[in-house]
Image: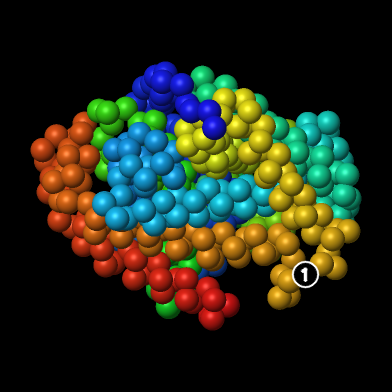
Amino acid sequence: MNRAPARARDAFTSRLGVILATLGSAVGLGNIWKFPYLTGDNGGAAFLVVYLLATLAVGLPVMIAELVIGRRARADAVSSFERLAPPGGGAWRYVGVAGVCSAVFLLAFYSEVVGWVFAYLFESLRGAALSSDPAANAARFTALAHDPVAALGWQWAALAWAAGIIVCGVARGIEAVTKRLMPLLFLLLAGLAVHALTLPGAGRGLAFLLQPDFSRIGPAVVLTALGLAFFKLSLGIGAMITYGSYFRADQDIPLTATRVMLADLTVSLLAGIAIFPAVFSFGFAPASGPALVFMTMPAVFSQLPAGGVLLAVFFALIAIAATGAMLSILEVPVAWLVERHGWGRARATVAATLVIALFGAPAALSQGVGAAFTLAGRSVFELYDFLTSQLLMPLTGIAIALFVGRTWSAAALAAELGQGGGARRAALVGPLRVLLRWVAPLLIAVVLLHGWWGG
Ligand code: PHE
């Protein structure tokens, strides 16, 4: 077996680069098709309060745990556990292995959705006719998702795009691209949001998104918020461990994590402001997921002046958001192959991408030709979603919280938190350890069990 040559590790080069790459990971499909709709449907501003509490109790602590693991070990997700595990703790490496596996399965179906986004972006740039009828748009979407050649082709295009950036490395690939794309994303999003606010009916859209309704808040909503906080911050697949390993030594991790969380929240809210006023302005019903993105929004835009341009902007925005997320997912197996197995970066990227494409194909085909194949009532797409979001990611998250909370000394944690943040950060050690030892694992476990039995 060949060993990794002893050369300097690739890493992020600037503090802003670190923040934008990490934010690029957090911002993704979740901001556009999960967050705004869930917020609107679950109590508006009241849901936001619950989401923030969930983030403080689970999201931020686990994110900080992942980042400090990576930066302390300076290695990929699996090697990080091998380097940092206490004596006799060889089994911790399987937490990293689970992360690599969930990254593969997550990207296997995430890339399919990104493929649809790419297809729509291409179509809207070509000026394809918009229909104001959601049913016609539904038919168009089905035609794409059910056509094996189109579904596979666009999925591969999405994967090839991510792989092409990953091959260039951490500083010259991930950092360089996210540094350019994230400001563009904010610009496009702010433009769309301001435009949406000028539409008649904007008030009703905003009310849908923000009007607090505390009567909606029940156990199910709290669990939804917890799951969302976890997914939004890209936790449970080792992506933040891998990115943390590229952080500068003087990067203030708690501050960076908090900033990323707030900026991600801002993107989600702006997305909601860009979407719902327009939806309500034309009397459409807000929908969730693919229906909103691929059926409702084209119909909404078709009614607006310059709707074709706005639609292209809308899909460009989602494509940009999804790119940063894909990069962080793909980097997990690539870093593992490069560092743990000594592969060259190009070979590792090609191999990881091919394996993901292989697993991704049944997911892409599961909408059309493969629809008949189901397991326990789930299509391959749903199976992957279940396997990652409901199983591997939460379990990995619990293990990560316990690893830092229970096997690290307070001094080790204080040393990592203090870097770049000064001695004041030591005050965070106590509360953070309580969250990592008890609060986060228990809350994630409850969400997990609810996902299994509660539906
Ligand atoms: N945070 C990303 C989103 O909102 C998804 C993601 C999850 C990315 C896990 C990386 C790791 O879409």
Locate residue 405: give its quadrant: bottom left
Secondary-structure class at tag 1: loop
| Mark 1 within 8 Å of ligand 1, using the beta carbon | no
Q: Residues within 10 Å of mark 1 (few under 14, many from 20)?
A: some
Q: Residue at x 37, y 42 (%)?
A: 80
Q: Position of residue 282 (x, y in %)?
A: 71, 55
Question: At which x and y percent is residue 226?
Answer: 42, 64
Position of residue 260 measured from the top left corner of the image (x, y, whole percent)? 38, 41
Q: Residue at x 55, y 41 (%)?
A: 333
Which of the image's four quarters has the N terminus?
top right
Quarter of the image for residue 330 reads top right
- Identify whether 371 is placed above or below 310: below
Would residue 305 be found to the left or right of residue 31 on screen? right
Left/right of residue 331 with respect to residue 380 in the rendered view: left
Residue furthest to the bottom in view is 453
* 163 to 114, vertically: above or below: above
* Amino acid found under the numbered disc labelled 1: Thr
Residue that protrudes farthest toward the front in the picture: 1
Location of the C terminus (image quadrant): bottom right
Estimate the x, y position of residue 239 in percent, counting from the top left: 47, 43
As drawn, is 166 to the left or to the right of 238? Answer: right
Q: Is residue 16 above or below residue 351?
A: above
Q: Quadrant of residue 259?
A: top left
Residue in the foreground of this view, choosing between 71 and 29: 71
Q: Which residue, given by chain and number where applicable, does mark 1 sit on? A: 374
Camera-nearest residue between 447 and 343: 343
Whether residue 339 appears in this view of the structure is yes
Count of numbered labels shown in the rendering: 1
